[in-house]
Image (cartoon, rainbow, N blue to C red):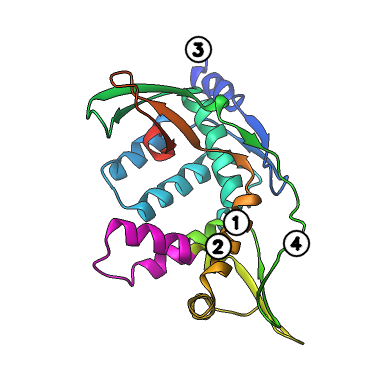
Amino acid sequence: MSNWKQDFQTTINSYVFECVLPGSKEVIKFKPVDVATMRKLLIYESSNDFDTVEFVLDDLIKNSVLEPATLNIDDMYIYDRLYLLFQIRMKSKGESIQSNYSCPKCKNQSIHAVALSDFPFNEYKEPKNFVIPALQDVSLELCHMKRSHQKEAAAKLKEDKDLSENQRQYLSMLYTMAAAISAYIGKDFKDNTLTLDDKLFILDRLPDSVLTNIKNWHEDNRFGYDVVFEYKCPHCKHSEKREFDFEATI
């Protein structure tokens, strides 16, 4: 009798894909998301909590990546992580995505189709400088945002109660940027042991122009997929830029 299970497993094991992360240049080997993994993740389907959804995506990566076996998701650049999620999604469900959108102008609903391969892609370029001047004799050393910075910011955000959605979005951005400050540089010293509270203490007391410069540094040094696309309403022709909701496509 044919050992069909062994043959089947051999066939499944041959479906291995490879990609190179644009930032770290790490070679990743992964398998598509299987039904068993999706079944485990379905228990979080109704969650609207950003932090919970991000942990679900971490689990998806852990269940898909084969090599390196020691991949540290916390140490991944957020743009490398997004790139990897795109690759896993394309090999698991295909490149084409259809999503329902509600037009803010005419309120009509429509289905918008987008291909993941159509998103603009920015190659990684080493920043010219990782240091941002803050005040006379004071500078801040920055680093690319990592998954660990997101998690640190999310934990801090849970300390803030009764926030509006706008406040929550602003603080999430602020805390993540603060977490990605790698060092405080004084006149003749450098401190790279700052806690997140230390970093927020510094940012709270600096001119707003410094925060703008930090935001610009991160924006100028983005790499990987640009997840903003143009949505056009087929009913009233209203057009606007929207950020791609990756979580909704899993």
Q: Which residue is mark 1?
A: 216
Question: Which secondary structure lies at badge 1?
Answer: helix
Q: Which one is in front in this view, the residue at disc 1 or the one at disc 3?
A: 1
Residue 231, image quadrant: top left
Q: Which one is in front in this view, the residue at disc 3 or the one at disc 4?
A: 4
Asked whether residue 59 is drawn in magenta, I would say no
Q: CA distance from mark 1 to mark 3?
A: 65 Å
Question: Which secondary structure lies at badge 2?
Answer: helix
Q: Quadrant of the C terminus?
A: top left
Q: Which residue is mark 2?
A: 212
- Residue sitting farthest toward the top: 1
Residue 180, image quadrant: bottom right
**In the rendering, which numbered label is found on residue 99?**
none
Q: CA distance from mark 3 to mark 2?
A: 69 Å
The x, y position of residue 89, in whole percent, is: 50, 31
Amino acid at the residue labelled 4: Asn
**Mark 2 closeness class: few <14, some 14–19, many ≥20 residues within 10 Å:** few
Question: Which secondary structure lies at badge 3?
Answer: loop
Question: Residue drawn at (33%, 23%), measured in percent from left and top?
Answer: 233
Residue 76 visible, this angle: no
- Range of the magenta residues? 151-175
Q: Which residue is mark 3?
A: 1
Query: Pointer 3 and pointer 4: residues touching (CB < 8 Å)?
Result: no
